[in-house]
Image (spheres, grey):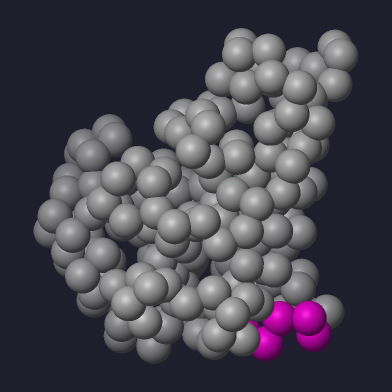
Amino acid sequence: MVLGILGSGSGSNMQAILDAIDAGTLDARIALVLSDNPHAIILERARGRGIATGVIDCRGFRTKFPEEAQAETAGRLKAAGVELVCLAGFMRLVKRPLLDGYPNRILNIHPALLPAFPGLESWKQALDAGVPETGCTVHFVDEGMDTGPVILQERVPVLPGDTPQSLHARIQVAEHRLYPAAILRIAAGLAPAPSL
Ligand code: GAR
């Protein structure tokens, strides 16, 4: 399974995928890592591993992922031979034409038990809501915000005295187990999208 990763931040989830590949538990290869942030640590991590990287030119938009940039991204992923696209802390909404380039072949990891707490800083949303547990979700990406079919979820307790940072850190420990496991399910044909 040839993977392409899109990320905006530190890339700890990409690192977890690499660790699973190194450990021999995930038979895959990361061919390309792209970021909308030229200074993102995920790019440094990928370069350190000799993985091809690139910056997505979002034409100066702060949060939007313009159509031309989505088409370019699909083209670069295709040229690199990518079969499955993994969003790993990528903070822009994917729409067509990137979705059209990879129908049912784009995954996202989200730091909550979807459909609860979609959007930004879901760990803060969970704390504010006073729920006793939250978690993380790997799902197929569709045109909505954090709405595509769920592949795997893991529960994480909210503990007394949790801060946004401590809760997010606990969720990330679970994320690092969940993302490689979800990719493995897809590679094994266990979690096809309905139309595959
Ligand atoms: C992860 O916690 C991921 O779930 C979250 O960003 C973090 C990226 O961390 N994604 C979202 O909130 C998407 N809505 P990483 O760069 O260390 O993998």
At a point 68% along the width and 13% down the height, the residue shown is: 130
**Can you see residue 12?**
no
Image location of residue 73, percent across then percent down: 27, 66
Q: Residue furthest left?
A: 68
Q: Quadrant of residue 155?
A: top right
The quarter of the displayed image where residue 119 is located: top left
Whether residue 25 appears in magenta in the rendering, the answer is: yes
Which quadrant of the figure contains the N terminus?
bottom right
The vertical placement of 74 against 120, above or below, is below
Q: Position of residue 31 (x, y in %)?
A: 50, 80
Total numbered badges shown on the rendered structure: 0
Image location of residue 8, percent across then percent down: 47, 47
Left or right: residue 93 compared with residue 33: left
- Vertical order, 143 against 16 (above or below): above
Write down the region rendered in magenta: 24-29
Where does residue 168 sit, x and y in percent of width and height?
Answer: 70, 32
Residue 47 located left or right of residue 80: right
Query: Per the image, is 106 magenta?
Result: no
Q: Above or below — where is 144 with respect to 88?
A: above
Compare residues 154 and 124 and report the one nearer the observer. 154
Figure quadrant of the C terminus: bottom left
In depth, the one of 15 and 106 nearer the eye is: 106
Viewer-proximal residue among 120 and 150: 150
**Residue closest to the far front:** 194
* Residue 65 visible in rendering: yes
